[in-house]
Image (spheres, rainbow, N blue to C red):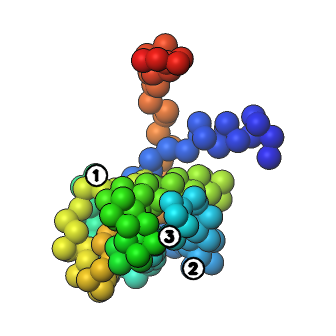
Amino acid sequence: MEEKQMMAVLQGRRSIRRFSAQPLARELLTQLVVAACWAPSGSNAQAWQYVAVDDPEKLARLTAFLPGVQAPPPALICLCLDRERETARAGQLGEEVLGVMDLSMAAQNIMLYAHCLGLGSCAVRGFHPTVVRTALALPPQVTPELIIVLGYPAQQPKAPARRPLEEVLHWNVY
């Protein structure tokens, strides 16, 4: 991929909250999780777990608890952290910091790859963990950290303005 193509992908991805009714093939969801698994992982813990949801009834129940998502998406992926594995591989720092950082990078892989596949996505963190844990039957050591809703976009919002580099880039000292 050329530099300009990569920048176009980075600048073209948007948070999509409205999707067409077209279902997503499980093969696409699997490809997105493969992309996620290629994210960096502190201490190579790879303590991530993914729950892909494509059942319309379960999507409707979960969406009721996802602020900002007006209607059930065709699919979602819940990114979870296996805290036992993270602690065993990376200690307290892993459990408290690195595991969530790993999932953040995995989420970016999912959303960028989804964009390349013509899909829309939106990361959602404002959910009640107990509701998600129960709905997805997560074991006690696995915690839901982020949900990415997915589907074919029904809208393409414009890019919000970005702060000028002069406000965010500092050389050598703040």
State if disc 2 and disc 3 touch (CB < 8 Å).
Answer: no
The residue wearing badge 1 is 68
Q: Amino acid at mark 3?
A: Ala
Nearest to N terminus: mark 2 or mark 1: 2
Query: Where, by quadrant of the figure, is residue 34 drawn?
Result: bottom right
Query: Alpha-carbon neighbours of circle 1 within 10 Å: few (<14), some, or many (≥20)?
Result: few
Query: Where, by quadrant of the figure, is residue 28 drawn?
Result: bottom right
Side (left or right) of 38 relative to 123: right
Figure quadrant of the C terminus: top left
Query: For the residues marked 1 and 3, what is the alpha-carbon distance in whole angstroms?
Result: 32 Å
Nearest to N terminus: mark 3 or mark 2: 2
Residue shown at the point (59%, 76%) measured from the top left: 30
Residue shown at the point (19%, 65%) measured from the top left: 128
Query: For the residues marked 2 and 1, what is the alpha-carbon distance in whole angstroms?
Result: 25 Å
Camera-side residue of 164 and 88: 88
The residue wearing badge 3 is 45
